[in-house]
Amino acid sequence: MPEKKSLFHIITELIEIFFNSSRSLKRGRTWNQHVVPYEDAWAVRREGNKRITSKHRKQSTAINKAKALAKKYNADVIIHRENGEIRDRISFNDANPKK
């Protein structure tokens, strides 16, 4: 039979859940850079942004720009195919080196 919890324990658990979730919201936005197809070209877009950072004729140029930004901010580069699928991920995060 499950153990019955007192009202005090339930309230304590709810408060703990609330504070843990609010801490995760304060982490801020990520600096991951996505290389995406954009108007018959390629664009670099920071994760979560609607606007693009830069537009390039070649995917390789966009990848180089995204790598430079990702290195600066210890982030990842996520490279997409023309159909939008992710084809590769390069990490420049010091905690998770995967170059």
Image (cartoon, rainbow, N blue to C red):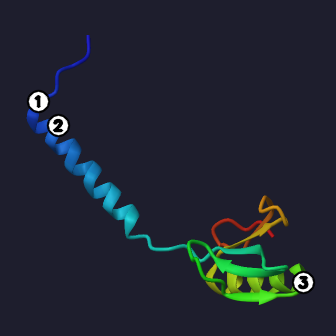
Q: Which residue is mark 3?
A: 58
Q: Which amino acid, by three-letter code, is at mark 3?
A: Lys
Q: Position of residue 70 (x, y in %)?
A: 69, 80
The answer to whether 64 is drawn above or below residue 91 in the figure is below
Upstream in sequence: badge 1 or badge 3: 1
Disc 2 residue crowd, few under 14, some 14–19, many 20+, Cα 10 Å: few
Mark 1 element type: loop
Residue 70's tag is: none
Q: Are marks 2 and 3 in contact (CB under 8 Å)?
A: no
Q: Which residue is mark 1?
A: 6
Instruction: Look at 26% across and 16% down and name the residue there.
Output: 2
Q: Which residue is mark 2?
A: 10
Disc 1 residue crowd, few under 14, some 14–19, many 20+, Cα 10 Å: few
The answer to whether 54 is drawn above or below residue 16 in the figure is below
| Relative depth, front residue between 4 and 47 | 47
Q: Position of residue 55 (x, y in %)?
A: 76, 88
Mark 3 element type: loop
| Relative depth, front residue between 46 and 96 | 46
- The quadrant of the rendering that contains the C terminus is bottom right
Q: Which amino acid, by three-letter code, is at mark 1?
A: Ser
Q: Is residue 87 visible?
A: yes
Which circle, 2 or 3, is nearer the viewer?
3
